Amino acid sequence: MMIRELQIIDLDRVYEIEKEAFKNPYEKNMLQFLYDIGTGFLVAEEKKLIVGYIIFSLKEENQGNIISIAVDRKFRNQNVGSALIQMAIDVLKKFDVEKICLEAKSSKHEVINFYKKLGFKKKEILKNYYEDGSDGVSMYLKNRLIKKYPDEYKYDG
């Protein structure tokens, strides 16, 4: 598996994964906007097929934010998501980020447990956070708690 920066020609495939992964996906023009403004946007590629992506940014000084992450259903539970998060963390560390935040639906226990396994801690419940009125949970990872993953993931960016 290779992790690299998104190229504009990858956008259609990323949008397919987005629609598969989320009940209320970002529109393709929003993904394009996030790419255009220079948000961190990495893809995981397996045999020239995009199998996952992560979008992240600097939220404020010394703080990063994971905006979205998704993996093709056929490639889940194969460390694709973990590798994408680790690569985003490595990029954010170059900007002296000390804390990384994210939000997830509070009802998505599998997703929350995935983040917990990576060292993220629950911060607070966000009432009516999502468009459908469901609650969210904010989570964070302090830089010193960041777990390291095998160097088998190659970043080509």
Image (tube, helix red, strand yellow):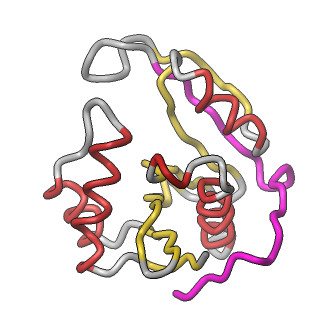
**Foreground: 122 or 4?**
4
Residue 76 appears in the figure: yes
Name the residue located 61 percent from the left edge and 72 percent from the top edge.
Answer: 91
- Residue 44 spot, x, y in % from top left: 51, 69
**Residue range highlighted in magenta:** 136-157
Outermost residue on the left side: it is 29
Of residues 57 and 43, the one drawn nearer to the viewer in this rendering: 43
Q: Quick check: can you spot residue 69?
A: no
Is residue 146 on the magenta stretch?
yes
Residue closest to the eye, 81 or 129 = 81
Quarter occupied by residue 96: bottom right
Q: Is residue 64 magenta?
A: no
Measuring from the top left, give residue 34's x and y in whole percent: 28, 62
Which picture quadrant has residue 1?
bottom right
Please indicate whether residue 106 sits to the left or right of residue 26 in the image: right
The residue lying at 83 percent from left, 55 percent from top is 147
Residue appearing at x 73%, y 32% in the figure: 121
Q: Is residue 110 above or below residue 150?
A: above
Q: Position of residue 12 (x, y in %)?
A: 22, 66
Q: Give the quarter of the image for residue 26.
A: top left
